[in-house]
């Protein structure tokens, strides 16, 4: 029989395999880490603002809401537009140190919310892999679900904090040319995701 510790160990492995794949949140964390070594922690908080209610909905049996065609297209279209704006603005400020969106600085928590909520594949992961984990956590009751949710979020927290701290500590090695290159790569990454999400939503 599966033990609680064994289950939580599997949660850590599966969660890290997902969070370590580069995506919109990673790109935003790299950009924000240039000015604040703790940005990753705040981005993880923003990420959790979207993720925790989603986990609760799945726990209550609403996973199918995120796999229907209308929801997929809607999230993909809105997400593509959001990431496109973020990517373009990142290009605009690549010679500075603070990302702006619509002329207003995007703080780290809001960045985490925007980058997470605009990614339709984040919702797809939770409707499939995440749902399986939630279902398994039910074996251990409500406490099992709560420990699962907290363990998964801690994986996000420590990974994004590691990224931002690494970027922040190495910032002295960043010339203006390097900074522009990094911000350009992050901006281009967000624009690529935006294009893919929009294409997926419209086809």
Image (tube, rainbow, N blue to C red):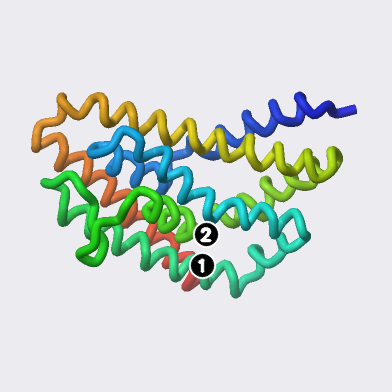
Write the residue at 28% across / 46% down.
186
Q: At 14% across and 42% down in the image, what residue appears?
A: 180
State the mark number for residue 143. Answer: none
**In front here: 74 or 144?**
144
Q: State the residue lying farthest toward the left.
A: 176
Whether residues under marks 2 and 1 lie with C-beta atoms below 8 angstroms apart, the answer is: yes
- Give percent across and percent down for residue 177: 9, 37
CA gap between label 2 and label 1 equals 6 Å
| Secondary structure beneath label 1 | helix
Seen as rendered, the residue at the extreme right is 1
Q: How many marks?
A: 2
Task: Assign the N terminus to one quadrant of the image.
Answer: top right
Q: Nearer the viewer, residue 6 or 124?
A: 6
Location of residue 59 in the rendering, given as x and y in whole percent from the top left corner: 75, 54
On screen, residue 63 above or below 139: below
Dot 2: within a 10 Å radius of its alpha carbon, few (fewer than 14), some, or many (20 or more) residues?
Answer: many
Residue receiving disc 1: 75
Q: Quadrant of residue 3?
A: top right
Residue under label 2, please give it: 120
Q: Is residue 117 left or right of residue 61?
A: left
Q: Is residue 174 left or right of residue 68?
A: left
Name which quarter of the figure residue 155 lies in.
Answer: top right
Identify whether 62 is placed above or below 141: below
Q: Position of residue 73 (x, y in %)?
A: 53, 71
Q: Earlier in the sequence, mark 2 or mark 1?
A: 1
Along the horizontal axis of the image, is 84 left or right of 158?
left
Q: Is disc 2 placed on a helix, strand or loop?
A: helix
Q: Which of the pair 59/1 is nearer the observer?
A: 59
Q: Residues within 10 Å of mark 1 (few under 14, many from 20)?
A: many
Task: Determine the residue positioned at 42% across, 67% down.
Answer: 198
Residue at 26 percent of width and 51 percent of height = 187
């Amino acid at each position: 029989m599966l033990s609680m510790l064994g289950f939580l160990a599997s949660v850590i492995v599966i969660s890290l395999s997902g969070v370590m794949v580069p995506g919109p949140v990673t790109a935003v964390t790299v950009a924000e880490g240039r000015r604040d070594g703790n940005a990753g922690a705040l981005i993880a908080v923003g990420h959790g603002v979207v993720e925790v209610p989603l986990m609760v909905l799945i726990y209550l049996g609403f996973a199918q809401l995120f796999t229907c065609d209308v929801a997929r297209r809607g999230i993909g279209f809105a997400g593509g537009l959001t990431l496109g704006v973020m990517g373009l603005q990142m290009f605009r400020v690549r010679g500075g140190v603070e990302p702006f969106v619509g002329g207003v600085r995007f703080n780290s928590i809001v960045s985490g919310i925007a980058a997470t909520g605009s990614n339709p594949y984040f919702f797809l992961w939770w409707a499939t892999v995440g749902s399986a984990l939630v279902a398994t956590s039910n074996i251990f009751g409500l406490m099992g679900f709560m420990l699962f949710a907290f363990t998964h979020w801690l994986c996000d927290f420590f990974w994004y904090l590691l990224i931002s701290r690494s970027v922040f500590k190495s910032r002295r090695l960043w010339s203006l040319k390097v900074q522009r290159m990094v911000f350009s790569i992050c901006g281009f990454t967000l624009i690529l995701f935006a294009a893919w999400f929009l294409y997926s939503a419209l086809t």
